Amino acid sequence: MSTLKHKAINATKWNIIDIVLSNAINFLSIIYLANILKPKDFGLLAVLAVMTSLANVIINSGFFQALVHKGKEITNDDCKTVFTVNILISTSLYSILVLSSELIANFYESIELKGIIYVLFTSIIFNSVTVVHRAKLSIDMNFSYQAKINVIASLVSSITGMWLGYIGFGYWALVSIILTKSIVCTILYSVSSEWKIKFGFCYKSFKELFSYGSKLFLASIINTITLNLSNLIIGKLFSIKELGYYNQAQSYSNLLSNNIVAVTQKVTFPLFSSIKNDRKRVRSIYEQILTISTFISVPIVIGFASISNEFVLVFLNESWRPAVDLLAILCVAKSISPISMFNINLISALGNSGLVLKIDTLKMVLAVGVIYVTSKISLNAVAMGQVLLSLVFYVMNAIPNKKHIGLGLFNQIKIIYKIYLSASIMYIINTSFHLDCVYLSMFIKVVLGIFVYISSCYLLKVNVLRNLYWNFKNRA
Protein backbone atom coordinates (compact mmCIF):
# COMPACT_ATOMS: atom_id res chain seq x y z
CA MET A 1 0.00 0.00 0.00
CA SER A 2 1.39 3.43 -0.96
CA THR A 3 2.30 5.90 1.76
CA LEU A 4 -0.26 8.43 0.51
CA LYS A 5 -3.04 5.83 0.43
CA HIS A 6 -2.12 4.62 3.91
CA LYS A 7 -2.21 8.20 5.23
CA ALA A 8 -5.56 8.85 3.55
CA ILE A 9 -7.11 5.69 5.01
CA ASN A 10 -5.74 6.40 8.49
CA ALA A 11 -6.86 10.03 8.29
CA THR A 12 -10.36 8.99 7.21
CA LYS A 13 -10.55 6.48 10.07
CA TRP A 14 -9.66 9.07 12.68
CA ASN A 15 -11.95 11.67 11.14
CA ILE A 16 -14.84 9.22 11.33
CA ILE A 17 -13.99 8.48 14.98
CA ASP A 18 -13.81 12.22 15.68
CA ILE A 19 -17.05 13.08 13.91
CA VAL A 20 -19.06 10.14 15.25
CA LEU A 21 -17.98 10.47 18.89
CA SER A 22 -18.01 14.30 19.04
CA ASN A 23 -21.39 14.58 17.38
CA ALA A 24 -22.87 11.71 19.38
CA ILE A 25 -21.87 13.52 22.57
CA ASN A 26 -23.22 16.85 21.29
CA PHE A 27 -26.40 15.19 20.02
CA LEU A 28 -27.18 13.61 23.38
CA SER A 29 -26.57 16.88 25.23
CA ILE A 30 -28.81 18.87 22.87
CA ILE A 31 -31.55 16.22 23.07
CA TYR A 32 -31.39 16.46 26.86
CA LEU A 33 -31.48 20.26 26.82
CA ALA A 34 -34.31 20.35 24.25
CA ASN A 35 -36.46 18.52 26.79
CA ILE A 36 -35.86 21.03 29.59
CA LEU A 37 -35.35 24.32 27.73
CA LYS A 38 -37.82 26.32 25.64
CA PRO A 39 -37.77 26.64 21.82
CA LYS A 40 -37.15 30.35 22.36
CA ASP A 41 -33.86 29.57 24.15
CA PHE A 42 -32.61 27.81 21.01
CA GLY A 43 -33.93 30.66 18.89
CA LEU A 44 -31.79 33.19 20.76
CA LEU A 45 -28.63 31.25 19.93
CA ALA A 46 -29.81 30.76 16.34
CA VAL A 47 -30.00 34.54 15.83
CA LEU A 48 -26.32 34.80 16.69
CA ALA A 49 -25.26 31.65 14.80
CA VAL A 50 -24.54 33.54 11.59
CA MET A 51 -22.39 36.06 13.47
CA THR A 52 -20.48 33.28 15.23
CA SER A 53 -19.89 31.46 11.94
CA LEU A 54 -18.87 34.65 10.16
CA ALA A 55 -16.49 35.61 12.93
CA ASN A 56 -14.79 32.20 12.79
CA VAL A 57 -14.48 32.49 9.01
CA ILE A 58 -12.95 35.96 9.33
CA ILE A 59 -10.34 34.95 11.91
CA ASN A 60 -9.45 32.07 9.65
CA SER A 61 -9.14 34.61 6.82
CA GLY A 62 -8.39 31.84 4.31
CA PHE A 63 -5.04 31.33 6.04
CA PHE A 64 -5.87 27.82 7.17
CA GLN A 65 -6.46 26.68 3.57
CA ALA A 66 -3.46 28.69 2.40
CA LEU A 67 -1.14 26.99 4.89
CA VAL A 68 -2.48 23.53 4.05
CA HIS A 69 -2.25 24.26 0.32
CA LYS A 70 1.40 25.33 0.74
CA GLY A 71 2.04 22.06 2.56
CA LYS A 72 5.49 21.08 3.75
CA GLU A 73 6.94 24.32 2.37
CA ILE A 74 5.48 26.51 5.12
CA THR A 75 8.03 28.41 7.19
CA ASN A 76 8.16 29.61 10.77
CA ASP A 77 7.55 33.15 9.47
CA ASP A 78 4.34 31.91 7.83
CA CYS A 79 3.13 30.44 11.12
CA LYS A 80 3.99 33.49 13.23
CA THR A 81 2.37 35.83 10.72
CA VAL A 82 -0.87 33.88 10.56
CA PHE A 83 -1.05 33.58 14.35
CA THR A 84 -0.44 37.30 14.92
CA VAL A 85 -2.91 38.44 12.26
CA ASN A 86 -5.59 36.10 13.61
CA ILE A 87 -5.21 37.40 17.17
CA LEU A 88 -5.48 41.01 15.97
CA ILE A 89 -8.54 40.25 13.84
CA SER A 90 -10.33 38.25 16.55
CA THR A 91 -9.88 40.88 19.28
CA SER A 92 -11.05 43.61 16.88
CA LEU A 93 -14.10 41.55 15.92
CA TYR A 94 -15.01 40.92 19.54
CA SER A 95 -14.80 44.65 20.30
CA ILE A 96 -17.03 45.52 17.32
CA LEU A 97 -19.64 42.91 18.26
CA VAL A 98 -19.72 44.03 21.90
CA LEU A 99 -20.16 47.67 20.86
CA SER A 100 -22.96 46.58 18.51
CA SER A 101 -24.70 44.35 21.07
CA GLU A 102 -27.41 46.83 21.99
CA LEU A 103 -28.24 47.52 18.35
CA ILE A 104 -28.51 43.77 17.64
CA ALA A 105 -30.70 43.19 20.70
CA ASN A 106 -33.02 46.06 19.73
CA PHE A 107 -33.24 44.90 16.10
CA TYR A 108 -34.48 41.46 17.15
CA GLU A 109 -36.42 42.88 20.13
CA SER A 110 -34.67 40.50 22.54
CA ILE A 111 -32.77 42.21 25.33
CA GLU A 112 -31.25 38.85 26.35
CA LEU A 113 -29.02 38.95 23.26
CA LYS A 114 -26.88 41.74 24.71
CA GLY A 115 -25.56 39.64 27.59
CA ILE A 116 -25.16 36.58 25.38
CA ILE A 117 -23.01 38.53 22.92
CA TYR A 118 -20.61 39.66 25.68
CA VAL A 119 -19.98 36.08 26.76
CA LEU A 120 -20.46 33.95 23.65
CA PHE A 121 -18.15 35.86 21.32
CA THR A 122 -15.12 35.47 23.56
CA SER A 123 -14.99 32.06 21.84
CA ILE A 124 -13.82 33.89 18.71
CA ILE A 125 -10.56 34.85 20.39
CA PHE A 126 -9.96 31.33 21.70
CA ASN A 127 -10.64 29.81 18.26
CA SER A 128 -8.15 32.15 16.59
CA VAL A 129 -5.31 30.69 18.65
CA THR A 130 -5.56 27.18 17.17
CA VAL A 131 -5.53 27.91 13.40
CA VAL A 132 -1.80 27.29 12.93
CA HIS A 133 -1.80 24.19 15.13
CA ARG A 134 -4.65 22.63 13.15
CA ALA A 135 -3.11 23.54 9.80
CA LYS A 136 0.23 21.92 10.63
CA LEU A 137 -1.49 18.75 11.81
CA SER A 138 -3.63 18.66 8.66
CA ILE A 139 -0.56 19.02 6.43
CA ASP A 140 0.92 15.97 8.15
CA MET A 141 -2.52 14.31 7.86
CA ASN A 142 -2.30 13.74 11.60
CA PHE A 143 -6.01 13.61 12.38
CA SER A 144 -5.73 11.23 15.32
CA TYR A 145 -4.43 14.03 17.53
CA GLN A 146 -7.18 16.41 16.43
CA ALA A 147 -9.80 13.72 17.00
CA LYS A 148 -8.71 13.14 20.59
CA ILE A 149 -8.81 16.85 21.37
CA ASN A 150 -12.24 17.34 19.79
CA VAL A 151 -13.75 14.37 21.63
CA ILE A 152 -12.38 15.52 24.99
CA ALA A 153 -13.57 19.07 24.37
CA SER A 154 -17.04 17.86 23.30
CA LEU A 155 -17.36 15.72 26.41
CA VAL A 156 -16.32 18.47 28.83
CA SER A 157 -18.49 21.14 27.15
CA SER A 158 -21.55 18.88 26.94
CA ILE A 159 -21.33 17.90 30.60
CA THR A 160 -20.99 21.58 31.52
CA GLY A 161 -23.99 22.55 29.40
CA MET A 162 -26.23 19.78 30.70
CA TRP A 163 -25.33 20.61 34.30
CA LEU A 164 -26.14 24.31 33.81
CA GLY A 165 -29.40 23.37 32.11
CA TYR A 166 -30.31 21.05 34.97
CA ILE A 167 -29.80 23.72 37.63
CA GLY A 168 -31.93 26.22 35.73
CA PHE A 169 -29.58 28.47 33.75
CA GLY A 170 -31.76 28.33 30.62
CA TYR A 171 -30.12 29.55 27.40
CA TRP A 172 -26.80 30.04 29.22
CA ALA A 173 -26.44 26.26 29.12
CA LEU A 174 -26.30 26.47 25.30
CA VAL A 175 -23.80 29.33 25.47
CA SER A 176 -21.58 27.35 27.82
CA ILE A 177 -21.33 24.42 25.39
CA ILE A 178 -19.87 26.62 22.64
CA LEU A 179 -17.57 28.61 24.91
CA THR A 180 -16.29 25.68 26.96
CA LYS A 181 -15.42 23.69 23.85
CA SER A 182 -13.40 26.62 22.46
CA ILE A 183 -11.50 27.04 25.73
CA VAL A 184 -10.69 23.33 26.13
CA CYS A 185 -9.53 23.00 22.51
CA THR A 186 -7.30 26.06 22.86
CA ILE A 187 -5.69 24.77 26.04
CA LEU A 188 -5.06 21.26 24.67
CA TYR A 189 -3.64 22.46 21.34
CA SER A 190 -1.43 25.08 22.99
CA VAL A 191 -0.04 22.82 25.71
CA SER A 192 0.66 19.69 23.67
CA SER A 193 1.41 20.89 20.14
CA GLU A 194 4.95 20.87 18.76
CA TRP A 195 4.46 24.39 17.39
CA LYS A 196 4.63 26.85 20.25
CA ILE A 197 2.80 30.16 20.15
CA LYS A 198 4.99 32.95 18.74
CA PHE A 199 4.11 36.49 17.71
CA GLY A 200 5.67 38.04 14.63
CA PHE A 201 4.90 39.45 11.22
CA CYS A 202 6.52 38.94 7.83
CA TYR A 203 5.05 40.95 4.97
CA LYS A 204 6.36 38.50 2.37
CA SER A 205 4.60 35.58 4.08
CA PHE A 206 1.42 37.58 4.54
CA LYS A 207 1.34 38.61 0.88
CA GLU A 208 1.97 35.08 -0.39
CA LEU A 209 -0.60 33.40 1.86
CA PHE A 210 -3.23 36.09 1.48
CA SER A 211 -2.93 36.09 -2.32
CA TYR A 212 -4.23 32.52 -2.27
CA GLY A 213 -6.35 32.62 0.86
CA SER A 214 -8.07 35.98 0.23
CA LYS A 215 -10.36 34.60 -2.47
CA LEU A 216 -11.24 31.56 -0.38
CA PHE A 217 -11.74 33.95 2.54
CA LEU A 218 -14.28 36.02 0.62
CA ALA A 219 -15.89 32.88 -0.76
CA SER A 220 -16.19 31.47 2.77
CA ILE A 221 -17.81 34.66 4.04
CA ILE A 222 -20.31 34.64 1.19
CA ASN A 223 -21.00 30.93 1.65
CA THR A 224 -21.51 31.37 5.41
CA ILE A 225 -23.95 34.22 4.85
CA THR A 226 -25.79 32.14 2.26
CA LEU A 227 -26.11 29.13 4.58
CA ASN A 228 -27.28 31.23 7.54
CA LEU A 229 -29.37 33.80 5.70
CA SER A 230 -32.60 31.99 6.52
CA ASN A 231 -31.90 32.27 10.26
CA LEU A 232 -31.35 36.03 10.00
CA ILE A 233 -34.57 36.57 8.07
CA ILE A 234 -36.70 34.16 10.11
CA GLY A 235 -35.47 35.78 13.33
CA LYS A 236 -36.78 39.14 12.11
CA LEU A 237 -39.93 38.24 10.14
CA PHE A 238 -41.10 35.41 12.40
CA SER A 239 -40.89 34.98 16.17
CA ILE A 240 -37.78 33.88 18.04
CA LYS A 241 -39.78 30.79 19.08
CA GLU A 242 -40.43 29.87 15.42
CA LEU A 243 -36.77 30.41 14.68
CA GLY A 244 -36.06 27.91 17.46
CA TYR A 245 -38.16 25.29 15.64
CA TYR A 246 -36.44 25.97 12.33
CA ASN A 247 -32.97 26.04 13.84
CA GLN A 248 -33.40 22.73 15.65
CA ALA A 249 -34.76 21.08 12.51
CA GLN A 250 -31.79 22.51 10.63
CA SER A 251 -29.36 21.34 13.30
CA TYR A 252 -30.58 17.73 13.26
CA SER A 253 -30.57 17.57 9.46
CA ASN A 254 -27.11 19.15 9.40
CA LEU A 255 -25.84 16.67 11.97
CA LEU A 256 -26.13 13.83 9.47
CA SER A 257 -25.08 15.44 6.19
CA ASN A 258 -22.38 17.66 7.66
CA ASN A 259 -20.65 14.67 9.24
CA ILE A 260 -20.06 13.16 5.81
CA VAL A 261 -18.85 16.49 4.46
CA ALA A 262 -16.59 17.09 7.46
CA VAL A 263 -14.90 13.70 7.19
CA THR A 264 -14.24 13.92 3.46
CA GLN A 265 -13.40 17.62 3.37
CA LYS A 266 -10.77 17.45 6.10
CA VAL A 267 -9.07 14.52 4.37
CA THR A 268 -9.57 15.33 0.68
CA PHE A 269 -8.43 18.96 0.75
CA PRO A 270 -4.84 18.14 1.78
CA LEU A 271 -4.99 14.92 -0.26
CA PHE A 272 -6.07 16.58 -3.51
CA SER A 273 -3.73 19.51 -2.86
CA SER A 274 -0.78 17.09 -2.70
CA ILE A 275 -1.66 15.38 -6.04
CA LYS A 276 -3.26 18.33 -7.85
CA ASN A 277 -0.90 17.98 -10.84
CA ASP A 278 -1.99 14.39 -11.54
CA ARG A 279 -5.56 14.98 -12.76
CA LYS A 280 -6.22 11.34 -13.73
CA ARG A 281 -5.39 10.23 -10.22
CA VAL A 282 -7.55 13.00 -8.77
CA ARG A 283 -10.50 11.87 -10.90
CA SER A 284 -10.09 8.23 -9.91
CA ILE A 285 -10.01 9.04 -6.19
CA TYR A 286 -12.84 11.56 -6.52
CA GLU A 287 -15.14 9.03 -8.20
CA GLN A 288 -14.59 6.57 -5.37
CA ILE A 289 -15.25 9.22 -2.70
CA LEU A 290 -18.37 10.47 -4.49
CA THR A 291 -19.81 6.97 -4.92
CA ILE A 292 -19.11 5.61 -1.45
CA SER A 293 -20.09 8.80 0.39
CA THR A 294 -23.35 9.10 -1.53
CA PHE A 295 -24.16 5.42 -0.99
CA ILE A 296 -23.80 5.92 2.77
CA SER A 297 -25.08 9.48 3.34
CA VAL A 298 -28.15 9.67 1.10
CA PRO A 299 -30.14 6.78 2.66
CA ILE A 300 -29.28 7.98 6.16
CA VAL A 301 -30.54 11.52 5.56
CA ILE A 302 -33.57 10.51 3.47
CA GLY A 303 -34.33 7.75 5.97
CA PHE A 304 -34.19 10.31 8.77
CA ALA A 305 -36.70 12.44 6.85
CA SER A 306 -39.08 9.47 6.76
CA ILE A 307 -39.02 9.09 10.56
CA SER A 308 -39.04 12.81 11.44
CA ASN A 309 -42.40 12.56 13.23
CA GLU A 310 -41.33 9.58 15.32
CA PHE A 311 -37.94 11.15 16.10
CA VAL A 312 -39.46 14.35 17.48
CA LEU A 313 -42.04 12.53 19.61
CA VAL A 314 -39.57 9.93 20.94
CA PHE A 315 -36.51 12.07 21.64
CA LEU A 316 -38.02 15.51 22.20
CA ASN A 317 -41.58 16.30 23.32
CA GLU A 318 -44.91 17.70 22.13
CA SER A 319 -43.66 21.28 22.31
CA TRP A 320 -41.37 20.54 19.35
CA ARG A 321 -44.10 19.05 17.08
CA PRO A 322 -44.10 22.15 14.78
CA ALA A 323 -40.53 21.15 13.81
CA VAL A 324 -41.59 17.80 12.28
CA ASP A 325 -42.38 18.99 8.74
CA LEU A 326 -39.42 21.37 8.78
CA LEU A 327 -37.10 18.51 9.71
CA ALA A 328 -38.38 16.28 6.91
CA ILE A 329 -38.07 18.99 4.25
CA LEU A 330 -34.60 20.13 5.36
CA CYS A 331 -33.36 16.52 5.37
CA VAL A 332 -34.25 16.29 1.68
CA ALA A 333 -32.25 19.46 1.05
CA LYS A 334 -29.31 18.11 3.04
CA SER A 335 -29.24 14.87 1.05
CA ILE A 336 -27.89 16.95 -1.84
CA SER A 337 -25.48 19.13 0.16
CA PRO A 338 -22.61 16.60 0.53
CA ILE A 339 -22.15 16.00 -3.23
CA SER A 340 -22.36 19.75 -3.76
CA MET A 341 -19.65 20.42 -1.18
CA PHE A 342 -17.41 17.66 -2.58
CA ASN A 343 -17.31 19.52 -5.88
CA ILE A 344 -16.51 22.94 -4.47
CA ASN A 345 -13.88 21.40 -2.19
CA LEU A 346 -12.22 19.81 -5.21
CA ILE A 347 -12.14 23.14 -7.07
CA SER A 348 -10.49 24.78 -4.03
CA ALA A 349 -7.93 22.00 -3.62
CA LEU A 350 -6.92 22.28 -7.29
CA GLY A 351 -6.05 25.92 -6.66
CA ASN A 352 -8.91 27.70 -8.45
CA SER A 353 -9.97 29.91 -5.55
CA GLY A 354 -11.11 32.68 -7.92
CA LEU A 355 -13.76 30.42 -9.43
CA VAL A 356 -14.95 29.43 -5.94
CA LEU A 357 -15.46 33.11 -5.13
CA LYS A 358 -17.49 33.71 -8.32
CA ILE A 359 -19.69 30.66 -7.72
CA ASP A 360 -20.36 31.53 -4.06
CA THR A 361 -21.19 35.15 -4.95
CA LEU A 362 -23.83 34.00 -7.44
CA LYS A 363 -25.17 31.53 -4.86
CA MET A 364 -25.71 34.32 -2.33
CA VAL A 365 -27.65 36.41 -4.84
CA LEU A 366 -29.90 33.44 -5.65
CA ALA A 367 -30.35 32.59 -1.95
CA VAL A 368 -31.44 36.14 -1.09
CA GLY A 369 -34.10 36.03 -3.81
CA VAL A 370 -35.45 32.59 -2.90
CA ILE A 371 -35.52 33.22 0.86
CA TYR A 372 -37.14 36.64 0.40
CA VAL A 373 -39.96 35.16 -1.72
CA THR A 374 -40.55 32.05 0.42
CA SER A 375 -40.47 33.99 3.71
CA LYS A 376 -43.57 35.86 2.52
CA ILE A 377 -45.44 32.55 2.35
CA SER A 378 -44.63 30.41 5.41
CA LEU A 379 -41.86 28.77 7.43
CA ASN A 380 -42.35 25.50 5.54
CA ALA A 381 -41.99 27.41 2.27
CA VAL A 382 -38.61 28.71 3.45
CA ALA A 383 -37.53 25.10 4.05
CA MET A 384 -38.78 24.06 0.60
CA GLY A 385 -36.79 26.91 -0.87
CA GLN A 386 -33.70 25.30 0.65
CA VAL A 387 -34.39 22.13 -1.36
CA LEU A 388 -34.50 24.19 -4.56
CA LEU A 389 -31.32 26.04 -3.64
CA SER A 390 -29.50 22.77 -2.85
CA LEU A 391 -30.30 21.45 -6.32
CA VAL A 392 -29.21 24.65 -8.05
CA PHE A 393 -26.02 24.89 -5.98
CA TYR A 394 -25.07 21.32 -6.87
CA VAL A 395 -25.43 22.07 -10.57
CA MET A 396 -23.29 25.19 -10.20
CA ASN A 397 -20.57 23.37 -8.26
CA ALA A 398 -20.44 20.29 -10.49
CA ILE A 399 -20.29 21.85 -13.96
CA PRO A 400 -16.71 23.28 -13.67
CA ASN A 401 -15.23 19.87 -12.80
CA LYS A 402 -15.81 18.61 -16.34
CA LYS A 403 -12.98 20.94 -17.35
CA HIS A 404 -10.83 20.24 -14.29
CA ILE A 405 -10.94 16.43 -14.16
CA GLY A 406 -13.33 15.41 -16.93
CA LEU A 407 -16.13 14.59 -14.46
CA GLY A 408 -18.91 17.11 -14.93
CA LEU A 409 -22.56 17.25 -13.91
CA PHE A 410 -23.98 14.56 -16.21
CA ASN A 411 -21.09 12.16 -15.56
CA GLN A 412 -21.70 12.48 -11.83
CA ILE A 413 -25.45 11.99 -12.18
CA LYS A 414 -24.82 8.74 -14.06
CA ILE A 415 -22.74 7.54 -11.09
CA ILE A 416 -25.21 8.42 -8.32
CA TYR A 417 -28.77 8.54 -9.75
CA LYS A 418 -29.53 4.90 -8.85
CA ILE A 419 -28.59 5.60 -5.25
CA TYR A 420 -31.04 8.52 -5.05
CA LEU A 421 -33.72 6.42 -6.75
CA SER A 422 -33.25 3.62 -4.19
CA ALA A 423 -33.45 6.11 -1.31
CA SER A 424 -36.62 7.64 -2.81
CA ILE A 425 -38.31 4.22 -2.97
CA MET A 426 -37.39 3.71 0.68
CA TYR A 427 -38.87 7.11 1.61
CA ILE A 428 -42.16 6.49 -0.22
CA ILE A 429 -42.67 3.11 1.45
CA ASN A 430 -41.70 4.37 4.91
CA THR A 431 -44.05 7.37 4.79
CA SER A 432 -46.99 5.31 3.50
CA PHE A 433 -47.90 4.06 6.98
CA HIS A 434 -47.97 5.19 10.63
CA LEU A 435 -48.57 3.21 13.80
CA ASP A 436 -50.12 4.52 17.02
CA CYS A 437 -47.07 3.41 19.00
CA VAL A 438 -44.32 5.80 17.88
CA TYR A 439 -41.58 3.60 19.34
CA LEU A 440 -42.74 0.57 17.35
CA SER A 441 -43.33 2.73 14.28
CA MET A 442 -39.80 4.12 14.43
CA PHE A 443 -38.24 0.68 14.88
CA ILE A 444 -40.17 -0.86 11.98
CA LYS A 445 -39.40 2.06 9.67
CA VAL A 446 -35.66 1.87 10.40
CA VAL A 447 -35.51 -1.89 9.77
CA LEU A 448 -37.82 -1.74 6.74
CA GLY A 449 -35.94 1.27 5.34
CA ILE A 450 -32.60 -0.55 5.46
CA PHE A 451 -34.11 -3.62 3.78
CA VAL A 452 -35.87 -1.64 1.04
CA TYR A 453 -32.81 0.52 0.30
CA ILE A 454 -30.37 -2.40 0.02
CA SER A 455 -32.88 -4.45 -2.01
CA SER A 456 -33.47 -1.52 -4.37
CA CYS A 457 -29.73 -0.98 -4.83
CA TYR A 458 -29.33 -4.68 -5.60
CA LEU A 459 -32.17 -4.75 -8.14
CA LEU A 460 -30.93 -1.56 -9.79
CA LYS A 461 -27.40 -3.02 -9.87
CA VAL A 462 -25.71 -0.21 -7.94
CA ASN A 463 -22.00 -0.85 -8.51
CA VAL A 464 -20.78 0.11 -5.05
CA LEU A 465 -23.06 -2.50 -3.44
CA ARG A 466 -21.86 -5.20 -5.82
CA ASN A 467 -18.21 -4.23 -5.17
CA LEU A 468 -18.70 -4.41 -1.42
CA TYR A 469 -20.36 -7.81 -1.78
CA TRP A 470 -17.52 -9.29 -3.87
CA ASN A 471 -14.83 -7.80 -1.60
CA PHE A 472 -16.53 -9.34 1.42
CA LYS A 473 -16.96 -12.70 -0.36
CA ASN A 474 -13.33 -12.81 -1.50
CA ARG A 475 -12.05 -12.04 2.01
CA ALA A 476 -14.33 -14.69 3.48
Image (tube, rainbow, N blue to C red):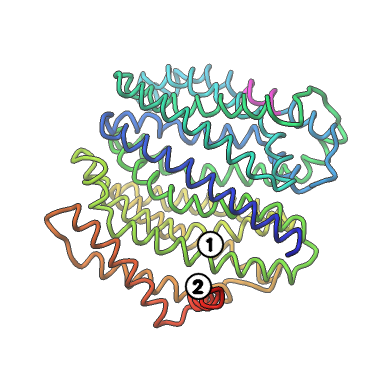
Rendered image quadrant of residue 454? bottom left
Viewer-proximal residue, 73 or 12? 12
Provide the residue designation for mark 1: 339
Disc 1: CA contacts within 10 A as few (<14), some (14-19) or many (>=20): many
Contact? badges 1 and 2 (CB < 8 Å): yes
The amino acid on which the numbered mark 1 sits, given as a three-letter code, is Ile
Q: Is residue 26 left or right of residue 2?
A: left
The residue lying at 29 percent from left, 19 percent from top is 168
Count of numbered circles in the view = 2
Q: Is residue 233 left or right of residue 394?
A: left
The amino acid on which the numbered mark 2 sits, given as a three-letter code, is Ile
The earlier-in-sequence mark between 1 and 2 is 1
Secondary structure beneath disc 1? helix
Q: Position of residue 121 (x, y in %)?
A: 52, 24
180 relative to 325, above or below: above
Residue 184 colored in magenta in the image? no
Chain part drawn in magenta: 86-92
411 relative to 267, above or below: below
Does the magenta stretch mainly form a helix, a strand or a loop? helix
In the orientation shown, which residue stands out farthest toward the left? 436
Q: Is residue 348 left or right of residue 112?
A: right
Q: Is residue 403 left or right of residue 317?
A: right
In the orientation shown, which residue stands out farthest toward the front? 476
Disc 2: CA contacts within 10 A as few (<14), some (14-19) or many (>=20): many
378 relative to 449, above or below: above
Rendered image quadrant of residue 188? top right
Q: Position of residue 471 (x, y in %)?
A: 55, 75
Secondary structure beneath disc 2? helix
Rendered image quadrant of residue 242? top left
